[in-house]
Image (tube, rainbow, N blue to C red):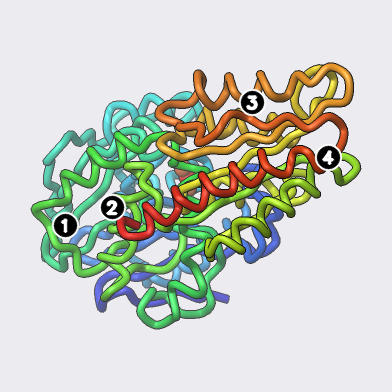
Amino acid sequence: MNDLQHVTPDILWVGGSDRRLARFENLFPLENGVTYNCFLIQDEKTTLMDTADSGVTRQFFENLEIALQGRGLDYLVISHMEPDHCANIEEVCRRWPGVKLIGNAKTFQLLRQFYSLDLEGRTLEVQEGTEVPLGKHTLRFMMAPMVHWPEVMFTYETTENILFSADAFGTFGGFSGNLFSDETDYEDLYMAETRRYYTNIVGKFGPQVLAAMKKLQGVTPRMICPLHGPVLRGDTVPLVMDKYHQWAAYKPEKAGVVLAYGSMYGNTEAVVHKLAGMLAARGVQDIRIYDTSKTHYSWIIADIFKYSDLVLASPTYNMHLYTPMETLLQDMIDLNIHGRDVGIIANGSWAPAALAIMQKKVEQEMKHMNLLVPPMLIRSAMKPDQQEELEQMADALADSVKAKAKEC
Ligand code: FEO
């Protein structure tokens, strides 16, 4: 059964929501699924904006066949060649053999790598600023390399002022039934997942995201159609664009402290809880505590982007770091997270390697990270004579948060 919806009288959503998928990219847990958005523009030329993941193939084709109303398909625009969007290109070409594939040079290079399609006479290669008229509508292409892959491009529809933004401005989460962001409480329903999606999927590429957004300065889209999540409309357009400017610049949204710890038997955890209580006593309101063994690192990464300050606490394990903490720190390095004020707490019973390893990762392998106080070393369990040292860390963190409260 089709579940297509109208974006405008001439533009239809023909994608699908997958609530069964456990992990996006087989990596990131999905609590409420994900949508794969595709749009059909009905004009003199019928134009499909992207295909969808193999998990929603049936829904996608049921929607597309109904939306076409028996007409053929003239163009398929390929904004992004990641398989969550390109998985049905071969089948589209099989059903509509006359379709022309619109992409850039890198699009077609990746298309040849993923599939064995005969592209001879089937492609329309576009570059920055190329315009393709469809009848009433005209598509203008803007290259957006590394938002999230090198071939990514935005498409601006100039008649109705609609931006097709590929992965940018998208979110995890299946549709609630409402296609448009301003039909829901977007901040309540989607913003945390918008942040987790951006920070984990695209977060490494902040400078490239800012470069792509600079190209949008001359346009004021009435709507943004991302490849995942609701169509953005109304106040949500500037809201999400502002968030992207902050995230892409690695600027914290709020003054507050994330405390991420690993703990085998509760001794490191106890120090973190004690520190959190000290912060609360000093008036810090936004304190987020995460056990790295329990909470998937993607949620912790999202809050590290969100908040200004960070405490990392880990025992020594196999002469290295506790594995979930190692994963978190390596992901922070890979995502280029920088510009945070940090406290470090390390534990070790006989050869406490964790302190030097965490300090090196934070100070040398990440950029512009500031250790507020020297790292604190716990030998098995914190003792009363270390109370003062922990108080000093709490003082430094609380002062740091208060100083930023006016900026964030
Ligand atoms: Fe939704 Fe980068 O794929």
Q: Nearer the viewer, mark 2 or mark 3?
A: 3
Badge 1: residue crowd in 10 Å (few <14, some 14–19, many ≥20): some
Residue position for label 3: 358
- Residue 134, numbered label: 1
Q: CA distance from mark 3 to mark 1?
A: 56 Å
Q: Is the residue marked 3 within 8 Å of ligand 1, measured from its CB? A: no
Task: Say which residue label 4 marks.
Answer: 383
Q: Are marks 3 and 1 in contact (CB under 8 Å)?
A: no
* First reached walking from the N terminus: tag 2 or tag 3: 2
Quarter containing the C terminus: bottom left
Q: Please report the residue visible at 30 percent of the width from the left and 56 percent of the height from the top.
A: 407
Q: CA distance from mark 2 to mark 1?
A: 9 Å
Residue 386: quarter of image = top right
Q: Residue at x 34, y 61 (%)?
A: 240
In 3D space, how far apart are the residues under numbered discs 2 and 4 (Cα atoms)? 73 Å
- Which numbered circle lies on residue 74? 2
Sort mark 3 into few (<14), some (14-19) or many (20+) by Cα contacts within 10 Å. many
Q: Which one is in front, 317 or 18? A: 317
Q: Amino acid at mark 3?
A: Met
* Residue 322 falls left or right of residue 229: right
Tell us which disc is closer to us: 3 or 4: 4
Circles 2, 1 touching at the beta carbon (< 8 Å)? yes
Q: Amino acid at mark 2?
A: Asp
In this rendered view, identify the residue nearer to me: 363 or 332: 363
